[in-house]
Image (cartoon, grey):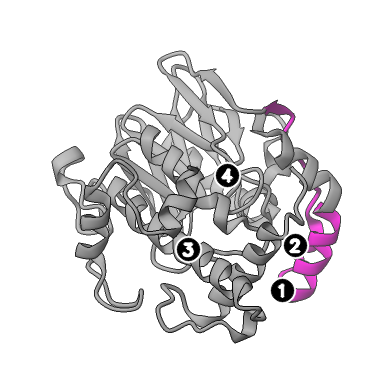
Amino acid sequence: MEDWKILLEGESLGLRQEIQLSVCYRRGPGVDRESEVLDTEELVRRGPVGHRMPVKFGSMTWRELADGVFVRRYDYPFDHNVGLILGAEQALVIDSRSNPRQADELLAELASVTKQPIGWLFNTHHHWDHTFGNQRFTESRIWGHRRCAATLLESGEATKKEISEAYPDDASYRDVVITPPTELFEESATIDLGNRPVELAYYGRGHTDNDAVLHVGEVTFAGDLVEEGSPPSFGDSFPIAWVDTVGRLAEAASEVIVPGHGAPVDPQHLVVARFDLAWVGRAAQAGKAAGLRVEEIDLGDSPYPEEPAREALTRAYSELDSKFSQ
């Protein structure tokens, strides 16, 4: 039986402590729970927000999660993370921010962290807040999943128009040049940085159909397959498939997991994320069996607020109706 079906029925996955862990974290209908944010003292000298203590370069703050592996957390537009990995002679950057102006800010900050040129850029998925700065990295090899590139080519201009209208006071969105990754992979790939390899992996549908993960030593950059501090974005997600995808990620993840948005977490966070996602499948399956519309489903035990919960259920209904092509 598939993992998500087992979760929908509330059975064990073979890791029976998962249920115990999820109960320990729960303190009500998905709102009040103990902190799941990683305090990394046991891994890399604890800091108060789950990193090593801040490493400051000029006026900018980066956090070193492991030797030569950094994260920078930006509050605009969506509390999102950018990663930096130092190679032997060149560096790799993870995601490019939301527009060319923000990418220019990022590049200026990177110059204060390292003198290494940026040899590689990795896009965790196609969404605009992770890729609309790509045009500033055309001298780098831009990596991403095959469908990341295809989706940017297919819908990038429409998204640019939509975002430009949503943020009319920021002219930089109108200056975006859609720049998809050109170094593409399907299931896995390895990039040799000269002093270490980084592993790229695709574990299945989740937040989108092209979420890719980067593993480097004791750190995993998980993109928006993992969120911390706010509900996931379900707009073009696959909530039922997401359960199994997070399970496969959990099997491969390192001790420090950097989400697309929010503070780094540990693998226990993925346990809770799976049970939260499994609620969507259970509720959608029960709702369809009862002939309910999405807006009629009772959200009393939802782990998410109403708006994302309804959005997730709408997507799950489509999954159950097999409306998405493989």
- Residue type beneath disc 2: Tyr
Disc nearest the viewer among 3 and 2: 3
Pointer 2 or 4: first along the chain: 4
Pointer 1 or 3: first along the chain: 3
- Residue type beneath disc 1: Tyr
Identify the disc placed on residue 299: none
Residue that carries the numbered disc 1 in the rendered image: 167
Please rate how many residues cluster around mark 2, counting C-alpha atoms within 10 Å: few if below 14, some from 14 to 19, many from 20: many
Q: Quadrant where the C terminus lies?
A: top right
Q: Circle 3 sits in a helix, a strand or a loop, which is it?
A: loop
Q: Label 3, label 2: how many angstroms apart (C-alpha)?
A: 18 Å
Please rate how many residues cluster around mark 3, counting C-alpha atoms within 10 Å: few if below 14, some from 14 to 19, many from 20: some
- Residue type beneath disc 3: Asp
Pointer 4 or 1: first along the chain: 4
Name the residue rendered at 49%, 65% in the picture.
Answer: 282
Q: Label 1, label 2: how many angstroms apart (C-alpha)?
A: 8 Å
Tag 1 near tag 2, CB within 8 Å:
yes
- Image-quadrant location for residue 217: top left
Name the residue rendered at 58%, 75% in the picture.
Answer: 287
- Residue 259: give x, y in percent of width and height: 43, 51
Residue that carries the numbered disc 4 in the rendered image: 95
Name the residue rendered at 83%, 53% in the picture.
Answer: 155
